[in-house]
């Protein structure tokens, strides 16, 4: 066969026909390469929802490539010849196809990037028609146009800063790209409406909620569901409710439904929870964004247009835009400028193992049971459930942050390492010592109760810090303050919390610490 000129490598989170890697694509001499491999579901114990979403979206994208007339070399997971890892499959493809150049859009995972580079460097030189040794393929990595900024631009912003803060970076991007700006000033006269976006639902609850955009599994997705249930039968979660968008067209429908039906109240109830209600007013678009079925600019532009048309309040539009134009870009910059050392950071020296019930939901703490069983059923939890329920408990308990990271990467359908790792280690677990968050986000069970957590359905009382009925969050909150008193007293944002320790007698402290030790031992918290 004739030698391939350009082999375009497409990863499972790069499902965009207009990606930079396709610029200049010539079907007569170029080809696309994709591979499903077991390693991507086993390097962390990937949930069935997450594996199914990636596999179904990849197979649908393969159909889109074929429809676009782009020659495709695609290895399916169940192929008997499948070698099991991305590196092995790529190495075999390079030997067979002998491309002059490998093109790809910048990847989102350090581990995958290292594997690809090693494969290219180890590729055998091809042989010319005259039997002369040729050169191995060149690797060309192109910018990911789904982002507003490049890693180099973020590095320039971060240079010389001991701490990285979202607010300053976010304002820079608003100004640079003219988002929610009027004559050089932020719409509404302020940059941030976070204070307006912290309402709880109150005793009556959220009332009638807009229906979630769902997509009935087609033949491709049903095939994937059967494959995942067979191949990864012992992995966490179920696929009974699988209804995520897996194509570009479905992702656009989900975006439109969100803008029209849920964005108006998204901002106000952004931090609220309610028992048995996983979706509320959240977009559920992060998976489609991270797979590149949607572009960040599409979502931001749609939200701004809805505000300017008077269909949604400014606080809601700004709240969503801050998550995408601000936070999403920010964590990507942190990841790529700090890796690989960032993944091993553990500023609080936390060493406790992750409780086994994080993988089952079998705990007698109602808020954790609600959040984890929901996560296993749908591969989804909104950001407050992640930060202030599952993440907060792990932080207060003192779980080794790398185990928390592996759990988040495994169970959520939108988990790609560039976005998940900084959110977990930096924001949730404070393992980077304050590089990207100004304080550890710690609170007692009263916070969860105030935001609509299922405390009335729980055996524990958020108001109690010791004793058999004490909420484990409240106990561990006070224990955390005791254990990290020196560190927290030096932080202006947590110094007041530490001062509250003076209200505790020595007997109170001892009771808290004894109860905390019982929680850590597993004597408290696991379902009976």
Image: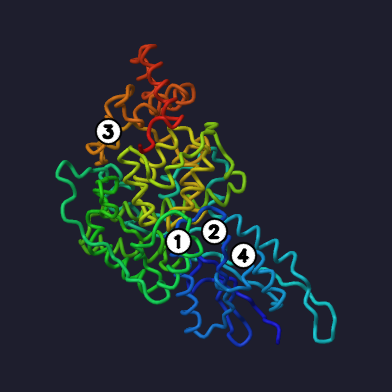
Q: Which residue is drawn at 44% across and 47% down?
A: 359
Dot placed on the residue nearer the N-terminal end, 3 or 1: 1
Q: How far apart are marks 3 and 4 (CA)?
A: 46 Å
Q: Which residue is drawn at 37% across and 43% down?
A: 362
Q: Nearer the observer, disc 3 or disc 1?
A: 3
Q: State the residue position of label 2.
A: 108
Distance (Cα) linking label 1 and label 2: 9 Å
**Residue under pointer 4:** 84
Coloration mode: rainbow
Say whether marks 1 and 2 touch (CB < 8 Å): yes
Q: Residue 459 carries which label?
A: 3
- In whole angstroms, how far apart are the C-alphas of marks 3 and 2? 42 Å
Residue 460 in the figure: left or right of residue 355: left
Q: Which residue is at 55% across, 68% downward?
A: 36
How packed mark 2 is, by other alpha carbons closer than 10 Å (few <14, some 14-19, many 20 or more), is many
- Residue 1: where, in percent of width, then height? 70, 87
């Amino acid at each position: 066969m004739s030698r391939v000129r350009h082999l375009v490598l497409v990863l499972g989170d790069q499902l965009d026909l207009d990606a930079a890697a396709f610029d200049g694509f010539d079907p007569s001499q170029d080809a696309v390469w994709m591979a499903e491999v077991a390693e991507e579901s086993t390097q962390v114990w990937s949930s069935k929802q997450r594996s199914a979403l990636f596999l179904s979206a990849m197979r649908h994208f393969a159909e889109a490539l074929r429809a676009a007339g782009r020659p495709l070399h695609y290895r399916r997971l169940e192929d008997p010849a499948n070698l099991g890892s991305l590196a092995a499959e790529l190495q075999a493809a390079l030997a067979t196809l002998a491309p002059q150049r490998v093109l790809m859009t910048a990847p989102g995972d350090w581990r995958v990037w290292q594997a690809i580079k090693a494969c290219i460097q180890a590729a055998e030189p091809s042989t010319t028609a005259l039997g002369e040794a040729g050169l191995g393929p060149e690797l060309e990595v192109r910018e990911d146009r789904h982002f507003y900024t490049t890693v180099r631009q973020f590095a320039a912003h971060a240079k010389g800063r001991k701490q990285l803060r979202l607010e300053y970076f976010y304002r820079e991007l608003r100004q640079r790209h003219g988002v929610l700006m009027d004559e050089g000033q932020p719409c509404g006269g302020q940059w941030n409406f976070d204070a307006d976006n912290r309402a709880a639902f109150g005793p009556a609850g959220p009332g009638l909620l807009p229906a979630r955009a769902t997509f009935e599994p087609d033949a491709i997705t049903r095939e994937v569901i059967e494959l995942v249930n067979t191949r990864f039968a012992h992995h966490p979660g179920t696929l009974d409710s699988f209804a995520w968008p897996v194509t570009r067209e479905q992702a656009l429908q989900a975006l439109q439904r969100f803008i029209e039906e849920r964005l108006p109240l998204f901002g106000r109830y952004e931090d609220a929870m309610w028992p048995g209600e996983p979706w509320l007013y959240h977009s559920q678009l992060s998976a489609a964004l991270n797979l590149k079925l949607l572009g960040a600019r599409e979502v931001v532009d749609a939200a701004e247009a809805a505000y300017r048309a008077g269909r949604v309040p400014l606080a809601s539009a700004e709240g969503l835009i801050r998550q995408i134009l601000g936070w999403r870009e920010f964590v990507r910059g942190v990841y790529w400028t700090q890796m690989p050392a960032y993944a091993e950071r553990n500023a609080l020296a936390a060493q406790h193992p992750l409780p086994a019930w994080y993988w089952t939901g079998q705990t007698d703490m109602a808020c954790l049971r609600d959040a984890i069983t929901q996560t296993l059923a749908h591969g989804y939890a909104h950001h407050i459930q992640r930060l202030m329920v599952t993440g907060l408990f792990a932080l207060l308990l003192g779980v080794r942050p790398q185990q928390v990271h592996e759990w988040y990467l495994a169970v959520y359908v939108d988990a790609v390492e560039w976005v998940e790792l900084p959110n977990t280690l930096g924001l949730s677990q404070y393992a980077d010592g304050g590089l990207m968050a100004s304080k550890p986000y710690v609170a007692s069970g009263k916070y969860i109760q105030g935001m609509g957590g299922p405390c009335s359905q729980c055996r524990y009382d958020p108001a109690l810090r010791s004793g058999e009925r004490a909420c484990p969050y409240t106990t561990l909150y006070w224990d955390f303050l005791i254990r990290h008193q020196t560190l927290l007293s030096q932080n202006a944002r947590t110094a007041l919390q530490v001062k509250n320790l003076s209200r505790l007698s020595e007997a109170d402290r001892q009771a808290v610490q004894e109860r905390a030790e019982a929680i850590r031992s597993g004597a408290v918290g696991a379902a009976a």
